[in-house]
Structures are given as structure tokens and as C-alpha cells.
Image (cartoon, helix red, strand yellow):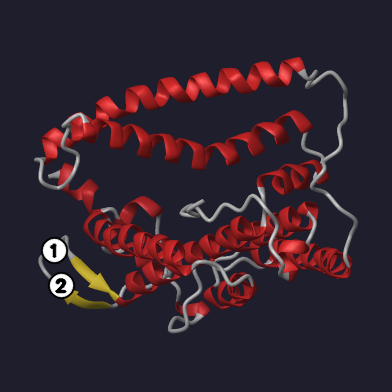
Amino acid sequence: MNNRFLINFTPGSTMMHKLTGGTKVLLFVLFTIAIIATFDVRVIAVLSILPIAAIISMKPNYKPIRFMIGFMVLVVGIIGSLMLLLVSPNAGLTNVGGSTVIWRLGENFFVTKETLWYIFAMFVKRLASFMVVIAFVLATTPSEFASGLAFLHVPYKVCTIVSLAYRTIPDIARRYTDIKNSMQMRGVELSKKASLGKRLKATAALLVPLVVSSFGKVEVIANAMDLRGFGRLKKRTWYSEHELTKADKVLRKLCILFTIGIVAYIVWFRVINPWPVTYWSPFIAREDIVKVGRFETLSILKWFGK
């Protein structure tokens, strides 16, 4: 099938694909926690190396990955940055601890060096999280995802629901395409030739049969699971979970060290000796940092005040 969503249903042949579901989910959770816990670009850059290397090692189809990265850059990097500059041009003062104006257009719109660094650091943090998700999706089948969650002692009913939802994404996309083609064959214009209003109206009409057919599919799956006695026992096995490979054993030992490192980092840099502001920057010394309230830099509040 056309792998537009990067979802694999059969394990690949690379080392990452051959890992057990438990190891993959454990790595995903640890890397996600590590990226969330830090706001230091230097640490985030180091954490990004392994997911990017994992993606390259799996030799994926780069076309959907490029599309997703481009969409993220457009929405988060460009549109999000412009909205931030409009609503809170001095966000760098709150999050970085300084305000060096490099361009000004009126009292309530200006650009500071610290705000640009804040936008860059925030984008790097989100891009790193995105790379972790992409690496996990490329390496993990829905069944491995469910077995990995079970390895983390998530109830198996929840694991099965997640696996089914994971598998349903391509089915919904396929039904969407079939319904769209059927409507176009009946003369409904959904291409760029039609006006935006007509396309939105036609798309809304398209969603009704899509939702109805999806609920019908859910009912069929639920009845099939009931007939097979799903949920009768307290535990179950997973056919996709296999014996640990050498790579699994090594990575799980490294995960223990990684967990210790994450806990030590959070305790020291977030509790005992926290940075005065949210984001570290290379051009502001700790003693020169200015601390202000988060809502003091919102220009939109000044507009309402007037």
C-alpha cells in the first residue's frame, strides 16, 4: 500500500526494526521525557542526533517525511513565529532574560535578539520531538506498539485500543479517497477549479459518509472481539513480541543509565540549581538576566488596555 503515513505493518530488516516493541516504546518514552525536561539547545541538539541517525539507518521513503517537516516549518516555524511577534514581541525578555531591540516598527511591534533566540530554541525543541516520533513510527508496527505498552504495564485493553486506532488511520484515509472519487464521478467538483466555498461545502458532505462508515467498521470490530472472548482474562500474550536480541539487551541497559541521567538532570537543573529563566542563551550571562512576569510582555494586553 502507499505508505503516506509512515505506518509499517510488517517489521523491516534493519536493527531498529528488529528490536522488540518493549524496547522501542521504552526508548520513545525516555527520549520524549528528556526533550520535555530540558530547554537548553545544546542538550536538545545532542538528543536529536540518535533519532535522526535511527531514521537514516532505516532507509525510509523520504517523500512523506519531507512533506511533514515542510508543513511543520510552515506552521510552527513561520506562521507561529509571526503570530508570536505580533502578540508578544518581547517574549525573549520573559523566556531568555534580556531585550536587545534590533528592529522597531512602532511602540508595540519590534524584534529583539532574545525573542529571535527564543523562537529558534522553541523550534529546535519541537523539531527534536518530531524526529523522535518519526523514528518511532517508522520502526514500530501497531502490534509492536501494543506489546510495548504492555511491557510498561499498561492494561492490555488500552493497548489493544491504541493498536486498533493506529491500524485504522490508513483505512480511514483509503475510505476518504474512495468516497471523494465517487463524489467526483457524480459531478461534484472538489479540485481547485471550484471556489473555496463550494469545496468546503462538498468536503463537509464528504465527511458524513466517512464518519458513518467508520462507525460501522468499529461495530464490526467490536462484535468480532466479543465473539472471540476479548477481555475475559486478566492477561494476554502478544504474537509480535519476540525474544530479546543482543541490541535489545544492550539498549535496555543503556536505558537504565539514561533514566538515571534524566532524573539527575531534572533534580539538579530544574529543582536544586534552576536557570533563572526558561531558555539558556549563549549571549546573556547568568548575572545579567532580567526576570519579569510572563504576562508583562503581552502586547495584546496593552491593546485592550487602550
In this view, 252 is above or below 149? below
Would you name the residue on which mark 2 appears? Answer: 104
How far from the left and from the top, in percent, is residue 113?
A: 31, 77
Q: Secondary structure at mark 1?
A: loop
Q: Residue at x 15, y 47 (%)?
A: 192
User: Where 210 falls versus 219 (above or below)?
Assistant: below
Work out which quarter of the rendered image holds the C terminus and state it: top left
Tag 1: Cα neighbours inside 10 Å, few (<14), some, or many (≥20)?
Answer: few
Which residue sits at x=65%, y=57%? 33
Is 269 situated left or right of 156 in this image?
A: left
Is residue 228 or residue 145 the one in the foreground?
Answer: 228
Q: How far separated are the C-alphas under marks 1 and 2?
A: 8 Å
Percent x, y of residue 174:
44, 39
User: Label 1, on which residue?
Assistant: 107
Pointer 2 local density, CA inside 10 Å: few below 14, some 14–19, many at least 20: few
> In this image, 67 relative to 280: left or right?
left
Measuring from the top left, give residue 5's x and y in whole percent.
Answer: 49, 52
**Amino acid at dot 2:** Arg
In the figure, 275 relative to 139: above or below?
Answer: below
Residue at (40, 71) in percent of width and height:
120
Amino acid, disc 1:
Glu
Residue 198: assigned label: none
Disc number lying in front (1 or 2) = 2
Residue in the picture at 20% in, 29% down: 186
Q: Is residue 278 visible?
A: no
The answer, for residue 228, to whether it is visible in the render is yes
Q: Position of residue 247 (x, y in %)?
A: 84, 69
Q: Name the element at disc 2.
A: strand
